[in-house]
Amino acid sequence: MIKEYKINIVREPGTDPLTGEFYPFEHEELQIEATSERSAYVLASSLFKMKARGQLLRFFINGVEYFDENF
C-alpha cells in the first residue's frame, strides 16, 4: 500500500573537504509517496536539491530520524 511520508533532510554545518568553503546548517522538506520508509528514504536521497559536499546529512521520516541499515 502506498503511503505519504514527510521527509525532513538536515545538513549539518561544515566545510567542503576539497575547497575549504564553509556550508552553514540547512534543511529541506519533501513529501514522498512510497510503499515503505526505506523506499521513501531512497527517493528522498535522489530528489533533494541542497548541496552536500562532505557534510553530514540526517534524514527524518515523519519526525523520527531514519538510519539506513545498509550503510
Image (cartoon, helix red, strand yellow):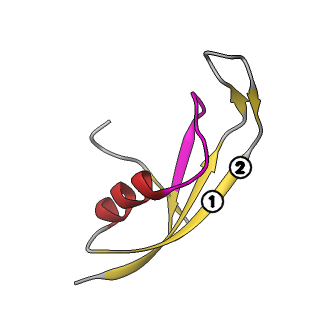
Give the amino acid type for the residue marked by disc 1 in the picture: Glu
Where residue 44 appears, x then y in whole percent?
A: 43, 59
Q: Is residue 47 magenta?
A: no
- Please provide the residue range marked out in magenta: 48-59
Relative vertical location of residue 13 with respect to residue 6 in this rendering, above or below: above
Where residue 29 appears, x then y in whole percent?
A: 60, 66
Quarter holding the N terminus is: bottom left
Relative vertical location of residue 37 with respect to residue 26 in this rendering, above or below: below
Q: From the image, tell me which residue sits under label 2.
A: 26
Q: Mainly helix, strand or loop, the magenta region?
A: loop
Crowdedness of circle 2 by 10 Å Cα count: few (<14), some, many (20+)? Answer: some
Residue at x 30% of width, y 44% of height: 69
Where residue 55 appears, x then y in whole percent?
A: 60, 32
Quarter holding the C terminus is: top left
Label ID, residue 28 = 1
Label ID, residue 18 = none
Q: Is residue 50 magenta?
A: yes
Residue at x 29% of width, y 62% of height: 39
The reply to whether discs 1 and 2 touch (Cβ–Cβ < 8 Å) is yes
Where residue 8 appears, x then y in whole percent?
A: 57, 62
